[in-house]
Image (cartoon, rainbow, N blue to C red):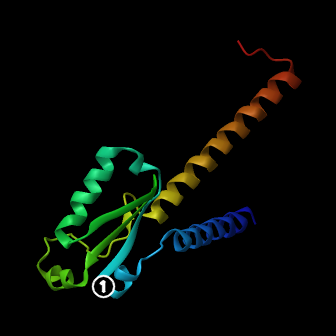
Amino acid sequence: MAGASAGAAAEAARRRLMEEEEEMTHYSTPDLEGEWEFKIVRANTGVFRNPAELDKLVKEEAPAGWILLEKFDNSRVRFKRPLSARQNDGRLPQGVDPYRTQYGMNPALFVTILTVVIVGASLLFTVFFILLIGLIVGGGSLL
């Protein structure tokens, strides 16, 4: 039951972020009438707080023609590129995805690792607490 409510909470948080991004992305008339496409790259953590990581992302996106437009926060960045850059997508180096929207660890893997860490810590705390209660009730010594 806790897993289902955690999943629902995560989905609600994702929806809130998407709605927030829609409100934050005010495209000008020249942007919309021009020959541009846009994307938002997201990270699971606040990795873009580090200027070196943000610079690394910008350099990784440049071969596909993406230009940094704005940094929303430490985990979301918006890019734009001319539609004509699509013509070069087939000639990009191996492993370059011009439409990637995730930076860093896969979100599913991130959630899995985070869940394992939280569950593991909870189990350790529970075992410690049970042992401590046993020592207190049994009159044992911690030393």
Task: Place residue 32 in its image quadrant.
Answer: bottom left
Percent coordinates x, y for residue 16 in the rendering: 62, 68
Q: Residue at x 27, y 85 (%)?
A: 35
Q: Residue at x 15, y 71 (%)?
A: 94
Task: Place residue 101 in its image quadrant.
Answer: bottom left
Who is closer to the viewer here, 28 or 121? Answer: 28
Name the kind of residue labelled 1 in the image: Gly
Say if 14 sits above or below 122 in the image.
below
Say if 115 sits above or below 69 in the image.
above
Say if 1 sits above or below 35 in the image.
above
Percent coordinates x, y for residue 95 in the rendering: 20, 69
Who is closer to the viewer here, 51 or 96? Answer: 51
Q: Is residue 39 left or right of residue 95?
A: right
Question: How many numbered marks are there?
Answer: 1
Say if 142 sits above or below 50 in the image.
above
Q: Residue at x 39, y 58 (%)?
A: 105
Q: Secondary structure at mark 1?
A: loop
Percent coordinates x, y for residue 118 in the rendering: 61, 48
Q: Which residue is mark 1?
A: 34
| Quadrant where the image shows the N terminus | bottom right
* Residue furthest front in the image: 29
Who is closer to the viewer here, 4 or 19? Answer: 19
Percent coordinates x, y for residue 45 in the rendering: 47, 52
| Quadrant where the image shows the C terminus | top right
Who is closer to the viewer here, 35 or 124? Answer: 35
Q: Residues within 10 Å of mark 1 (few under 14, many from 20)?
A: few
